[in-house]
Amino acid sequence: MTETPAYVPPKVWSPNKESGGRFANINRPVAGPTHDKDLPVGKHPLQLYSLATPNGVKVTIMLEELLALGHQGAEYDAWLIKIGDGDQFGSGFVAVNPNSKIPALMDRSGPTPVRVFESGAILLYLAEKFGVFLPTDGAARAECLSWLFWQMGSAPYLGGGFGHFYAYAPTKIEYAIDRFSMEAKRQLDVLDRRLAESPYLGGDEYTIADIAVFPWYGGLAKGWLYDAAEFLDVASYRHLQRWADTIAARPAVQRGRMVNRVFGEPSSQLHERHDAADFETKTQDKLAPAT
């Protein structure tokens, strides 16, 4: 059997061949817009441009939780950004998020619009704007923010690391899958140990830390990500499972998971959200043409 020669990195790397994989058509080594396209603007104070990936779902859950508490200033329009089609590289989107990643938020409630990008920054911005889901006590606030930033630093290993090589890479590479499976399970154990001593990540109260972590690690625990629940033995993390079940049962979380969703059961897909009534009238099962 002929052995494959070891890869020797060039002195200067350049993207001179197809990368392959699910997202090859949108991968590129430069920033900035690829085309001119203005973003739509709706009637509400908050304009969200997103897709129901785990990062996008964080923000729609937060907004639905705010509305459930009666914060009418949190009314929002959620516009669909199809990242597979390259919508995130339109000039209007890049003006809101120069990093060309969803989600991106424009707050038009004041005299000067405010842009906010990166999902953790958006959660923190909204929590401070409305005064909820973020403790004010020094120790409790520090704990909440520590878990929020833990998610920001950890999820790339789960998504871009484990998720990519296990589910999306064109070639299954044993070393890469082993490396990131090890890290994914370590992270699950970190969460399980914390949730063995506390009902929520920040302590006794539900906070933006839970909202940030749930779409990634709660989704993994519930079997929603990468078809990897058995592979990673997620059922064995019983404290994480209890926490995930508790959060998944919240009505605002259930609504938030539907917004900008373009996969799954038609009844779970609300491609755009412009009014609370849209959950009852504009899901894909209700918009599907009669046959």
Image (tube, grey):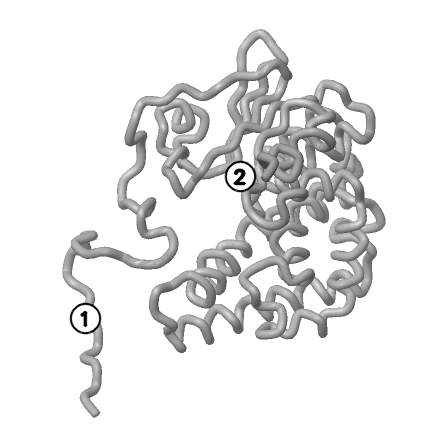
Question: What is the three-letter code of the residue carrying label 1?
Answer: Val
Q: Secondary structure at mark 2?
A: loop
Q: Which residue lies under the disc numbered 1? A: 8
Q: Earlier in the sequence, mark 1 or mark 2?
A: 1
Residue lying at 46% horizontally and 75% vertically, measured from the top left = 178
Q: What's the residue type where badge 2 is placed?
A: Leu
Is residue 237 shown above or below 157?
A: below
Quarter residue 205 falls in: top right
Residue 157 position within the rendered picture, expressed as x and y whole percent measured from the top left: 49, 60
Above or below 280: residue 47: above
Distance from Cα at disc 1 to Cα at disc 2: 38 Å
Percent position of residue 230, x then y: 62, 73
Q: Residue at x 27, y 45 (%)?
A: 29
Return the residue at label 2.
51
Labels 1 and 2 touching (C-beta < 8 A) = no
16 sits to left or right of 202: left
How dense is the environment of label 1, judged by Cα within 10 Å: few (below 14), some, or many (20 and up)? few
Q: Secondary structure at mark 1?
A: loop
